[in-house]
Structure formats: C-alpha cells, structure tokens
Image: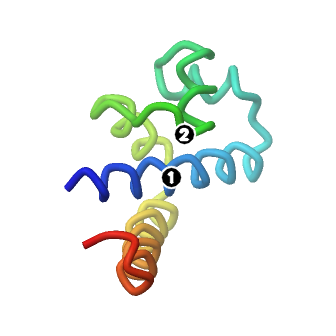
Amino acid sequence: MCQYKSLLRMFLRDTLYSYRKDHGLSQEQMAELLHISPRSYIDQEHGRYSFSAPTMMFFILALSDEEKLALIHGFKEYMEKAEERGDVM
C-alpha cells in the first residue's frame, strides 16, 4: 500500500502543476483554492507531502465534471503503467 501512496503523491504533484498552469493560477491562488498555506501548497506541488483528505476534497470540488473523470482515469493509467514496469506490486 505504501508504494501506491508514493505513486499517488507523484501523480498529484504533476496534476497540480498542470492544473495550476492550465488555469493561469499562482501558487498562492492554488493554496487559497485548497484552503492551505502557500508553503504547504509548494511542498505538495514539489511532492514533499501528500494531500490530506480535506485538501484532496477541495481540489476535487474545484474540478469540472470532465476534469474529475480525467483525474480518475489519469491515475488509473498512471498506476497501470507503474505496475507494468514493476514499480509497484
């Protein structure tokens, strides 16, 4: 299970950065959107820490319905590729 937590942290790091850039948001604006401090956001975007459950929920609430589905499908693909490479068992 620990391997999947690490995998999710890496996936979310990339997803956060892409979402922020695609929507023209600053790191401070993302922190506000997620109800966390700018320092916490920067640490999450850099993969130092994982999301808490409330932070993850605030991120999901900010997504459109299409983006929510893309998030789920994106993680599934990311996970399957990691399993094929043998990165997780």
Instruction: Report the front residue among 1 and 74.
Output: 1
Q: Residue at x 67, y 24 (%)?
A: 29
Work out which quarter of the rendered image holds the N terminus and state it: bottom left
Instruction: Report the front residue among 78 and 31.
Output: 78
Please name the residue that numbered disc 2 is placed on: 47
Query: The disc labelled 1 sits on which kind of residue?
Result: Met
Instruction: Say if 53 sits above or below 37 in the image.
Output: below
Residue 3, position in %: x, y? 31, 57
* Residue at the far left in the pictured view: 1
Residue 44, position in %: x, y? 53, 33
Q: Are marks 1 and 2 in contact (CB under 8 Å)?
A: yes
Work out which quarter of the rendered image holds the C terminus and state it: bottom left
Mark 1 nearby-residue class (10 Å; few <14, some 14–19, many ≥20): some
- Alpha carbons under labels 1 and 2: distance apart: 6 Å
Residue 2, position in %: x, y? 25, 50
Instruction: Please give left or right for residue 57 compared with residue 39 in the image.
Output: left
Mark 2 nearby-residue class (10 Å; few <14, some 14–19, many ≥20): some
Instruction: Please give left or right for residue 61 compared with residue 24 in the image.
Output: left
Q: Residue at x 39, y 86 (%)?
A: 84
Mark 1 or mark 2: name the one nearer the start of the chain. 1
Instruction: Say if 17 sits above or below 81 in the image.
Output: above
Please name the residue that numbered disc 1 is placed on: 10
Tag 2, which secondary structure?
loop
Circle count: 2
Q: What's the mark number on residue 56?
A: none
Instruction: Say if 39 sits above or below 9 in the image.
Output: above
Residue 77, position in %: x, y? 44, 79
